[in-house]
Image (spheres, grey):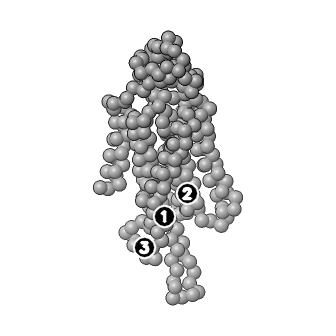
Amino acid sequence: MSRGLHFGAFFASLVYLEYGPTPTAKLGFYCRDPSISHPYKGDSVTLHAILGGSIAGPLLIIAAVELYREKNFSKRWGLEIWNWFRDFMIGLTVNLVLTQVGKVLIGEHRPHFFDTCLPDVGHTCSPGEFVTDYKCTNSFYSNYVITDSSRSFPSGHASVSVYTSLFCAFYIHLRLPSHQLRLVIKPFIIVCILLWSVVCCSTRITDYRHHWWDVLAGLILGIACVVYTVLTLCKPFETPLVVSKTHRPSASTTTLLDVKNKDATSVII
């Protein structure tokens, strides 16, 4: 199966899990549990911001870096952008699918569950009593938002932002070998990119949208998806001695050395 078909299958699965009639177990709760009694304040980093930043951001970074390497808008420039961005998107889609599977199968109430759901027995039950039979009475929010209030584990913002930041940091480290950029500019860019994931993860806790263990699980999932993408799709650690003209080099910087001629210079392609 080609990478395009893989991407299509994962994307279709993601849409089904998010918006399809996926059965979700109704989770019980402990009456007046303080961990799910926080107010619903919204998102400091919205869904549109995290998805837009995780798609447009890497695309712009890849385009800029490849332009810096090629020095012109050549056919090779466009091909390199497509190859790297395609691999990134496949890994991102896998990340999103696994995140949604976790939310559907495991779930867990968000810290603002009581405020969003307003269960009909919330004020009549005894403190500490475990309630399984209840009905959400909040008519201010849509059914999707109310259902989403029981899908806290794992954190999608954490998994997506960590995956995106680590992939971009790895890509910049691999594709910007310039000595002029190595000391200051390249590390600064990488730090700024990693700060994006730090902001996304920390605000999920301060906004009372996730528990800390939800964010930790999302972080681990994001790291795992980066490792999968880098090792199985990009294959950056392979440096073949001979590169076919009909295939893209597995590594972005391939050093060809003439071992027979000690005076030969290294060629970076």
Residue type indicated by callout 3: Val
- Residue at (47%, 13%) from the top-left corner? 121
Specify the farthest residue to the top. Answer: 124
Residue type indicated by callout 1: Pro
Which residue has dot 2 on it?
170
Q: Secondary structure at mark 2?
A: helix
Which residue has dot 3 on it?
243
Q: Are marks 3 and 2 in contact (CB under 8 Å)?
A: no
Screen quadrant of the N terminus: bottom left
Question: At which x and y percent is residue 204?
Answer: 57, 35
- Residue at (52%, 12%) from the top-left corner? 123
Alpha carbon separation for disc pair 3 and 1:
14 Å
- Of the numbered discs 2 and 1, the one sitting upstream in the chain is 2
- Residue at (49%, 66%) from the top-left corner? 237
Mark 2 is surrounded, within 10 Å at the Cα level, by few (under 14), some (14 to 19) or many (20 or more) other residues, namely: some
Question: At which x and y percent is residue 4?
Answer: 34, 52
Q: Is residue 27 left or right of residue 114?
A: left
- Residue at (57%, 37%) from the top-left corner? 212
Front disc: 3 or 2: 2
Instruction: Looking at the picture, tell me which residue is in the foreground, 236 or 219.
Output: 219
